[in-house]
Image (spheres, grey):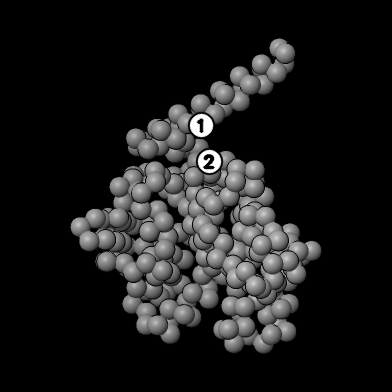
Amino acid sequence: MLTIDNLVKRFGRVTAVDGLNLKMKKGETLVMMGPSGCGKSTTIRMINRLVEPTGGSIHFAGQDITALDADGLRRIRKRIGFVFQHFNLIGRLSAWENVMLGLVMSGMPREEAGARAFESLTKVGLESQRDKKPGEMSGGQQQRVGIARALAYEPELMLWDEPTASLDPILVREVLVVMEELAKYRASTMLVVTHELSFALHVADRIVLMDKGKIVEAGLPSQVFVTPSSRIGQQYKELIEYQMNTSASTLAGKRIA
């Protein structure tokens, strides 16, 4: 479904993505992880050309996205959902209006767009909040509106650029639950850039680890996080072990008390 060949992005003298190659199958949930600044977000943003590649090709559904003109790019973007770190909602519009706006602007009749928007809000558990404006909602709810907005197009491919990065820790879980449900039912192929280990462990079909603009390891979560072959993979393994040991110690302390 998605094939990336020798993808490169340079910002002046800095190479953010350096000859990246990646293939995804239809219905797959792939989680891309790595340290801040390793090129994850740049990579995912190049897939729908929010960032223009310096070199390489990106083939999606039989088309090279890097070769599309403006009209072709607009058409392909309707098939690719994108969820941002920041919510990017319009403050004067309700949740329902925020979700349906893009559909109406793309030419869909308002009645059909409204029904599609309500269906998308229902998928993320916000049907009862449809008339609330962003300022009346929590950060987690706002991000779920952003997810509903992307789902409204019924995309074949969903791109997630650290969707929980702007949320307080207490709100992260409500967004991850929505993401897990979407992955479970495989309504679309999902490429997720995240630091959330729990999501990666429970949901990913495959993990891709990046460092300094390159993929340094890829495989099943049980492989990458248990018997890693890269320095980054080893660091994630140690982090998981630390978190597990800390949780076990905390539970033991509570039992003693």
Determine crowd level at label 1: few under 14, some 14-19, many 20+ residues with C-alpha closer than 10 A.
Answer: some
Q: Quadrant of residue 57?
A: bottom left
Q: How many marks?
A: 2
Residue at the image position 30 percent from the left and 47 percent from the top: 212
Task: Indicate the amino acid at tag 1.
Answer: Ile
- Circle 1/circle 2 CB separation < 8 Å: yes
Please report whichever mark, 1 or 2, sits nearer to the chain's N-terminal start.
2
Q: Which residue is mark 2?
A: 197
Give how far across and how far down residue 17 sits, in percent. 30, 56
- Whether residue 57 sits left or right of residue 140 in the image: it is left
Alpha carbon of mark 1 to alpha carbon of mark 2: how far? 8 Å
Classify residue 105 by image quadrant.
bottom right
Q: Residue at x 35, y 37 (%)?
A: 230
Place residue 186 in its image quadrant.
bottom right
In the structure shown, which secondary structural element does the residue marked by tag 1 occupy?
helix
Q: x, y (%) of residue 238? A: 45, 29
Location of residue 11 in the rendering, given as x and y in whole percent from the top left corner = 26, 61
Residue placed under numbered mark 1 in the picture = 240
The x and y percentages for residue 236 are 44, 35
Q: Is residue 226 left or right of residue 164?
A: left
- Identity of the residue drawn at 65% across and 72% down: 92
| Closer-to-camera residue (225/94) | 94
Residue 59's place in the image compared with 103, above or below, is above
Q: Label 2 sits on what residue type? A: Leu
Element marked by disc 2: helix
Q: Which residue sits furthest right?
A: 128
| 89 and 3: which is toward the camera | 89
- Viewed as shown, does residue 97 lie left or right of 37? right
Circle 2: is it few (<14), some (14-19), or many (20+) Cα within 10 Å? some
Q: In the rendered image, is residue 189 in sight?
A: no
Residue 253 seen from this side: yes
Quadrant occupied by the C terminus? top right
